[in-house]
Amino acid sequence: MEGSGATPQAQAPIAPQLKLRGVNHLALMTDDMKETIDFYGDVLGIRLIHALTVPPGVNRGNPPFERLRHYFFDMGNDESLAFFELPKGAKPQTDRDAVGGMQHVSFTADQAMFETVQDRLKARGIPILGPIKILGGRALSIYFYDHNDIRLELTCHLAHTDDPHVIDDMTMTKSAARPELMALHDDAAWVERTIAHLPD
């Protein structure tokens, strides 16, 4: 509507929910694949499952270098973590806090893994921030960096320490979400459509 100040996106009806199965893979960057295998395998227990070199002349959205290594790791829950290996010095370190940057990756852990990873990080002299209470005290998180300066988070949900229920713990009520969304956009109808699926 012209002159209303609302964007076309804000006026569009909320589409019916589609249930994605989950994350197929996240594709991150490294300049040392051996060190990446060692860090993610030894610290987080994320094991290598697929190793390939992108064939010459192939461009499917990969970084613009020939014959890049592209390796995949099992991060649990039938989901994977992937890395491209850039040539050393080919690109500067990215700004994780810039628009379009990836600020951090958070992994879910049960209580035993949460404690084990902290022990492994401390044994390697890797600084840890936390544990810090998040989600209104329903979970604990630690924060640390890998060898690529990628910021990582490990989260333990306290109500179900052996079988984490991430979505259950994160889901807000309508009344809790409404003030935040009204501060984002003052269209009450849009806010109500956005939170209609949340519990009362």
Image (cartoon, helix red, strand yellow):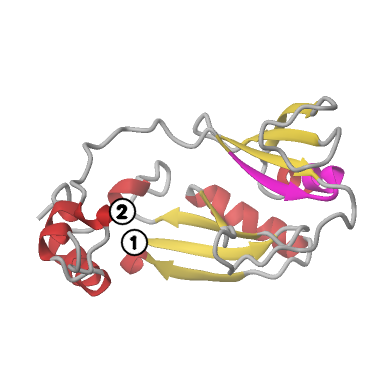
Determine if the magenta segment contains residue 93.
no
Determine contact: label 2, label 1, CB under 8 Å. yes
Residue at 66% over, 47% down: 44
Q: Which residues are magenta?
A: 26-38
Residue at 57% over, 62% down: 103
Q: Nearer the viewer, mark 2 or mark 1?
A: 2
Identify the residue under disc 1.
138
- SS of the residue under disc 2: helix
Identify the residue under disc 2.
169
Residue 199 rendering spot, x and y as whole percentages: 14, 51
Q: Nearer the viewer, residue 57 or 38?
A: 57
In the figure, residue 63 lies in which quadrant? Answer: top right
Amino acid at dot 1: Arg
Residue 41 rendering spot, x and y as whole percentages: 73, 42
Assess disc 1: are there few (<14), some (14-19) or many (≥20) residues with their C-alpha within 10 Å of its C-alpha: some
Residue 98 rendering spot, x and y as whole percentages: 59, 68
Q: Earlier in the sequence, mark 2 or mark 1?
A: 1
> Is residue 157 found left or right of 172 in the rendered image?
right
- Identity of the residue furthest to the bottom in this view: 183
Residue at 31% over, 53% down: 169
Where 24 falls versus 167 (above or below)? above
Determine if the magenta segment contains residue 37.
yes
Q: Nearer the viewer, residue 66 or 40?
A: 66
In the figure, residue 178 lies in which quadrant? Answer: bottom left
Amino acid at dot 2: Asp
Residue at 49% over, 33% down: 77
- Identity of the residue furthest to the right in this view: 88
